Amino acid sequence: MSYSEAKERYAKLGVDVEAAMAKLRDVPVSLHCWQGDDVRGFDTDPSKPLTGGIQTTGNYPGRARTPEELMADIDEVLKLIPGKVKMNLHASYAIFEKGEWADRDKLEPKHFKKWVDFCRERGLGCDFNPTFFSHPKCDPLTLSSPNEETRRFWIDHGKASIRISQYLADELGGECVMNIWTGDGFKDVPGDRMGPRVRYREAIDEILSEPYDFNKVKPCVESKVFGIGVEAYTVGSAEFALSYAAANPGKCIPLMDNGHYHPTEVVSDKIPALLAFYPEIALHVTRPIRWDSDHVVLYDDETREIAREIVRCGGLEGRVKIALDYFDASINRVSAWTTGFRNMQKALLFALLQPDAEEKRLQDQGDFTALMVLQEELKTAPFGDVWDEYCRRQGKPLDGEWFPEIRKYEAAVLSKRV
Ligand code: RNT
Ligand code: ZN
């Protein structure tokens, strides 16, 4: 079926395909720099293991080892994905001059100048994350540590990150979403569950006492259920993070990562629940398989359902900040990035092509039979033709066209990294 026929088919259902494509083009989705190098960054010894309960598995050749390599790989991805991209950096990706190094509590905006240049040249905004893991000062706790000196170091890192986030927003325009996540927690049954949480709360209070413009810098608190080696207790649990954000309106917003809940819970259902209370929320879109495994985002049921809730709750008007968060080291990393980003775009476009008003009407009238029939039939509507058109209009490759490009890049560039 051609695009014009698909457009007509959707029009019969009351869906304006042109408006859907136009809307999606302007919605920023954050592309996480950490897929390109297995979350290593540039400020610590790459031979040391990751800590904080996160893990990458696999050793597919071609991992980016320097800022130049990582930027080249991101450029390759940017050629292959439609939609509005925003970069998402971790503090550990600071770029130092030759012979220079600064510890995380001493990081400055200038250590991200090269990223600002990179983003500006490409017309991208930028999000930021303090890095509270994979560092000798994790004892293993960070912001919730009982050790005063440890806690001070990480609070100072958080404050430095606020200043860097403000710099990124000022230089690049738009908002800088600054996400606070720590892997703080215990492998086994704690003797004190509240102490670390109170210290964590006070530490975030201190970080957020650093001045910033909340219209531009959006600090978030990301919760988690457990991590590898941190199975029994997580300081920043769901209740902790939501309560923190609720208690600090105008200062910080909650962030949900869909790998961070029990397996029968779904973030799609939590989006409207939070939006009933919070003006703004942030998301990490990932794909958990049995645990927070951070597999590449697929065009699957839950990704579509997350996209549908973002769309029908008015999230595309800025209320929902969308970021990707996954890292697979067992496959070509440029392909992993491209696949996940394209799938998020697909899910959002699919969501924009659903007859939301009609579905709501049917539900409110109690016609659940018609609602089911409509929802099911929409699944085989000619979505692929609209997706192709969306890519074509942005001068980006269609499905079937981009992977050969990555194979070429792999042969010419990635395979030479040994
Ligand atoms: C870890 C969290 C966190 C990290 C990134 C690298 O479980 O999801 O968001 O993945 O900050
Ligand atoms: Zn996350």
Image (spheres, grey):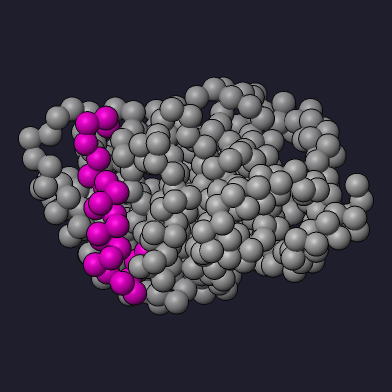
Nearest to the observer: residue 167 or residue 373? 373
Vertically, is 287 above or below 369?
above
Residue 245 is one of the magenta-drawn residues? yes
> Magenta residues, as a range?
230-253
Q: Is residue 221 left or right of residue 139?
A: right
Q: Position of residue 153 (x, y in %)?
A: 24, 52
Residue drawn at x 40%, y 75% as measured from the top left: 214
Quarter where residue 402 is shown: top right
Residue 350 visible in the snapshot: yes
Q: Residue furthest left?
A: 191
Vertically, is 109 above or below 214?
above
Q: Position of residue 407 (x, y in %)?
A: 79, 30
Residue drawn at x 48%, y 50% as measured from the top left: 268
Q: Is residue 292 left or right of residue 330?
A: left
Q: Position of residue 364 (x, y in %)?
A: 51, 64
Where's the C terminus, which quadrant? top right
Nearest to the observer: residue 20 or residue 104? 20
Residue drawn at x 15%, y 53% as measured from the top left: 199
- Image mark count: 0
Q: Position of residue 324 (x, y in %)?
A: 54, 48
Residue drawn at x 70%, y 58% as measured from the top left: 353
Vertically, is 71 above or below 53?
below
Q: Is residue 160 left or right of residue 354?
A: left
Residue 84 visible in the snapshot: no
Nearest to the observer: residue 162 or residue 115? 162
Residue 178 is one of the magenta-drawn residues? no
